[in-house]
């Protein structure tokens, strides 16, 4: 029999009891956080609210270039200001896709893009 160890002092080990309680509390918190996340409504990928989302879907909305924010027509394939492909199906059409690809390559070779470790490594 070893003297001085917690198990030799009494019937239950207090460190084991604290460990079981802590593990149970962490598991309970994990289950609660998981259930809270599952009950929450889905997060919209759009950063704006429903009013602006409804206004974007109207016919009177003016499309903007994703690169330079210049207004362009709904049937325009390329931005009149910067040349970026802005048409809804421009990159799916075989011939205009070549111009879109060329625009991307020109941006990459001119160095006019935001530098980050991901873009530099890529
Ligand atoms: Zn543009």
Image: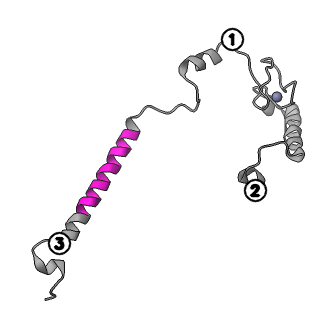
The reply to whether dot 2 and dot 3 touch (C-beta < 8 Å) is no
Which region is colored magenta? 20-37
Q: Point out residue 10 in the picture as x, y percentages from the top left corner.
A: 10, 75
User: From the viewer's perspective, is residue 95 above or below residue 70?
Assistant: below
**Mark 2 or 1: the one toward you:** 2
Q: Is mark 3 within 8 Å of ligand 1?
A: no
Q: Is mark 1 within 8 Å of ligand 1?
A: no
Circle 3 is placed at which residue position? 13
Instruction: Look at the image and tell me in which quarter the N terminus lies.
Output: bottom left
Rendered image quadrant of residue 114: top right
Are there few (<14), some (14-19), or many (20+) residues within 10 Å of tag 2? Answer: few
Residue 121 circle label: 2
Q: Secondary structure at mark 2?
A: helix
Residue 59 circle label: 1
| Prevailing SS of the magenta stretch | helix
Seen in the image, is 3 located left or right of residue 104?
A: left
Q: Earlier in the sequence, mark 3 or mark 1?
A: 3
Seen in the image, is 36 located left or right of residue 81?
A: left
- Quadrant of ligand 1: it is top right
Residue 10 circle label: none
Q: CA distance from mark 2 to mark 3?
A: 54 Å
Q: Point out residue 24 in the picture as x, y percentages from the top left corner.
A: 26, 57
Seen in the image, is 38 located left or right of residue 9?
A: right
Magenta span includes 76: no
User: From the viewer's perspective, is residue 5 above or below residue 35?
Assistant: below
Magenta span includes 33: yes
């Amino acid at each position: 029999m070893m003297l001085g160890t917690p198990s030799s002092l009494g019937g239950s080990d207090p460190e084991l009891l604290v460990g079981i309680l802590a593990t149970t509390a962490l598991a309970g918190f994990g289950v609660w956080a998981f259930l809270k996340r599952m009950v929450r409504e889905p997060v919209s990928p759009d950063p704006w609210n429903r009013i602006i989302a409804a206004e974007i879907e109207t016919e009177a909305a003016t499309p903007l270039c994703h690169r330079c924010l210049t207004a362009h027509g709904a049937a325009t394939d390329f931005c009149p200001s910067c040349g970026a492909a802005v048409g809804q199906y421009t990159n799916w059409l075989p011939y205009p896709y070549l111009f879109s690809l060329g625009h991307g390559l020109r941006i990459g070779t001119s160095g006019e893009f935001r530098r980050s470790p991901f873009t530099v490594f890529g």
